């Protein structure tokens, strides 16, 4: 019998790669998405697969399906998307988690939550280990995402304690790769699109703030390993690439890989923007025998090729403007 796997947010950046990976692993995949930020083009290559099914559904409403495993990814991940309707963002995270946990309880299904490094907020511990509790500005514009994700983690642990649910929590750090939305405002996609168009590259603050970037294939490998790990994996697990770079270094690397003539343009730092982010992945190494293997140069080259292809296709050009779905 094939495992039947539900992926919420399956038409998004990470979700579409996860669906593809699960199909390769001989699973039946049910992709559930309301297409808030997800794109049909991300899952188009999968639509012909007999083991792949898509359902348009908003996870803030209950879902009645029969599956063996659940990956809960539904939630806009980039600040410009999740800040557009912050109340809906909190609802998607929290009500979505409640609905998916309820489904997992009814089905006795294992469930994995896509949590985030944003639960650490603007950290004063570096690199971040899973036992670090984080500093989040509860009233800030990022709180709808950060605090909602913290609340979903709490729900997951309470469902484990109260109902003995088999849960997994991945704290995902910045991930990039093909299928990112070109206008999601995240630094990798923005820099690449600006470089390919020869526009100035917008760097916030001094550009000395750091991030670590994980290529999507590595991240998906970590997620599936976490889902398939023995039942005694307790607690959240950081998944990300510990190689840290400043925003200026990233911009210069992208300029060199694209052969662009773009120059850097500095703008004020947005409120509550974290200064530093780097995962400590000791737990993932130990429990999942996982570590990223794709170099930044290799991952960026593949991502640049994806955006280059997208931007040079005139049929795609007018679809690239992100509009708030009705
Ligand atoms: N990409 C990253 O770097 C990153 C980092 C940390 C955490 N995460 C988490 O991983 C998950 C996926 O992120 P992503 O980068 O693929 O983002 P994304 O915006 O590309 O994908 C999110 C998907 O969820 C769908 N969605 C949103 N609200 C929904 C709702 N109410 N009902 C059903 N579907 C809904 C969107 O349409 C989209 O397809 C998110 O939960 C995010 O918080 C991502």
Image: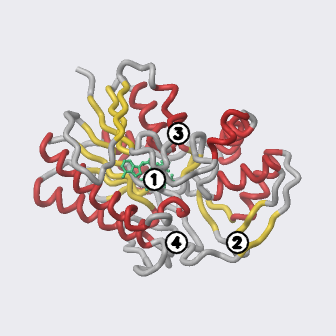
Sequence order check: which comes first, mark 3 or mark 4?
A: 4
Badge 2 local density, few (<14 within 10 Å), some, or many (20+)?
A: some
Secondary element at image label 1: strand
Query: What residue is rendered at 39% in x and 45% in y?
Result: 34
The N terminus - image quarter: top left
- Give 117 or 242, whichever is nearer the viewer: 117
Q: Which residue is mark 1?
A: 239
Q: Is residue 2 left or right of residue 320?
A: left
Sequence order check: which comes first, mark 3 or mark 1?
A: 3
Q: Position of residue 13 (x, y in %)?
A: 51, 44
Q: Are marks 2 and 1 in contact (CB under 8 Å)?
A: no
Secondary element at image label 3: helix
Secondary element at image label 2: loop
Q: Which residue is mark 2?
A: 208
Sequence order check: which comes first, mark 1 or mark 4?
A: 4
Q: Position of residue 128 (x, y in %)?
A: 47, 67
Q: Where residue 14 is drawn, which disc sits there?
A: none
Q: Position of residue 302 (x, y in %)?
A: 67, 38
Q: Which residue is mark 4?
A: 126
Q: CA distance from mark 3 to mark 4?
A: 25 Å
Disc 3 versus disc 4: nearer the observer = 3
């Amino acid at each position: 019998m094939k495992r039947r796997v539900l992926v919420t947010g399956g038409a998004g950046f990470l979700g579409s790669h996860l669906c593809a990976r699960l199909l390769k692993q001989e699973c039946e995949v049910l992709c559930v998405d309301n297409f808030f930020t997800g794109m049909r083009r991300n899952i188009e290559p999968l639509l012909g697969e007999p083991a792949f099914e898509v359902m348009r559904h908003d996870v803030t409403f209950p879902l009645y399906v029969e599956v063996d495993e659940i990956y809960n990814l539904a939630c806009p991940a980039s600040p410009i998307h999740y800040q557009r309707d912050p109340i809906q963002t909190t609802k998607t995270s929290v009500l979505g988690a409640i609905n998916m946990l309820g489904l997992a309880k009814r089905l006795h299904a294992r469930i994995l939550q896509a949590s985030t490094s944003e639960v650490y907020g603007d950290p004063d511990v570096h690199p971040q280990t899973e036992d670090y509790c984080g500093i989040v500005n509860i009233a800030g514009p990022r709180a709808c995402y950060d605090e909602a994700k913290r609340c979903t983690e709490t729900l997951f642990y309470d469902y484990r304690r109260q109902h003995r649910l088999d849960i997994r929590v991945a704290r995902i750090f910045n991930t990039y790769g093909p299928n990112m939305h070109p206008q999601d405002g995240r630094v990798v996609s923005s820099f690449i699109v600006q470089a390919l168009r020869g526009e100035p590259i917008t760097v916030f603050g001094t550009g000395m703030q750091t991030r670590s970037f994980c290529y999507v294939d590595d991240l998906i490998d970590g997620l599936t390993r976490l889902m398939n790990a023995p039942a005694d994996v307790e607690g959240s697990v950081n998944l990300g690439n510990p190689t840290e770079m400043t925003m200026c270094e990233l911009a210069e690397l992208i300029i060199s890989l694209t052969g662009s003539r773009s120059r850097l343009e500095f703008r004020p730092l947005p409120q509550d923007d974290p200064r530093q982010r780097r995962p400590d992945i000791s737990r993932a190494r130990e429990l999942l025998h996982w570590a990223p293997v794709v170099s930044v140069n290799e991952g960026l080259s593949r991502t640049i090729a994806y955006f280059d292809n997208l931007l040079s296709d005139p049929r795609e050009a007018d679809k690239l403007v992100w509009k708030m779905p009705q």
